[in-house]
Amino acid sequence: DAKTTQPPSMDCAEGRAANLPCNHSTISGNEYVYWYRQIHSQGPQYIIHGLKNNETNEMASLIITEDRKSSTLILPHATLRDTAVYYCIVRIYGGSQGNLIFGKGTKLSVKP
Amino acid sequence: DVKVTQSSRYLVKRTGEKVFLECVQDMDHENMFWYRQDPGLGLRLIYFSYDVKMKEKGDIPEGYSVSREKKERFSLILESASTNQTSMYLCASTLALDGGAVDTQYFGPGTRLTVL
């Protein structure tokens, strides 16, 4: 079972920031938070990951609370092409050769 | 950018046929994976490979086999396709886990297989 909890759906206006929350209250000290997204009928796409510090890349920012029990993925200027299901995953860095366990994710709808 | 390609986006086969799904990655990744994705069940790992000619079973290997003759290519084989193998099949690859490499998995576009 997934070890994360996400809202099932969210809406966001085009051009505005999309903030996607994730709860992972049972995260252990050696587990990272990863975010992927899946656009309809395509394979999952890696977005970002982090351990305890906030992270930013060309796609998004990841804010992790100090107690690491929750995090927020921020898409700073959402576009229509960001409409997708977003998955928050916790896993050990390098642990297990596979088996990304995707939960139900959050379906983000970006509206004009 | 990492490119992971799969041989077909859509495939329709008949029960009992032998089915080959091909996956190719162009980033010299050591590890490659085959998943299937079904509504309500998420991604489930079928097989993975960490080197040429090496393979490991995932969670649901029954009815499948794999082949890794070249580093860039990982094939999934359905020996005798059945209707319960109708699914979206996803291939992924990642760098080796030593040397501090991030094990971010890069996915192909998927193959939607229908077995009639």
Image (cartoon, grey):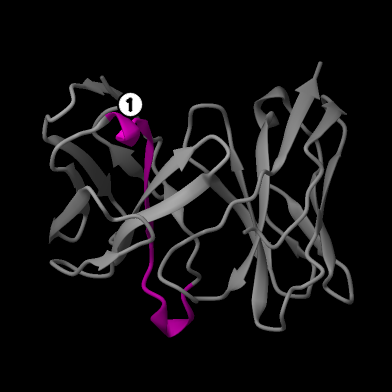
Q: Dividing the picture into quarters, in which one does residue B69 lie?
A: bottom left
Residue A77 appears left or right of A3: right
Q: Position of residue B67 (x, y in %)?
A: 14, 55
In-front residue for pair A52/A3: A3
Residue B11 appears left or right of A63: left
Callout 1: SS: loop
Residue A54 appears left or right of B55: right
Residue B48 appears left or right of A72: left
Picture layout, residue B73 above or below residue B112: below
- Please tell me how many numbered marks the rendered image carries: 1
Residue count near mark 1 (Cα–Cα under 10 Å), binned few <14, some 14–19, many ≥20 = some
Q: Position of residue A101 (x, y in %)?
A: 56, 57
Tag 1: amino acid: Arg
Does residue A36 show up magenta in the picture? no
In-front residue for pair A32/A26: A26
Does residue B84 show up magenta in the picture? yes
Q: Position of residue B101 (x, y in %)?
A: 46, 75
- Seen at 25% across and 44% down, the residue is B23
- Seen at 89% across and 75% down, the residue is A66
Q: Which residues are magenta?
A: B83-101
- Chain label for disc 1: B
- Seen at 54% across and 34% down, the residue is B39
- Seen at 84% across and 64% down, the residue is A70
Which image quadrant: the C terminus of chain B? top left
Q: Which residue is mark 1?
A: B9
Q: Dividing the picture into quarters, in which one does residue B17 lie?
A: top left
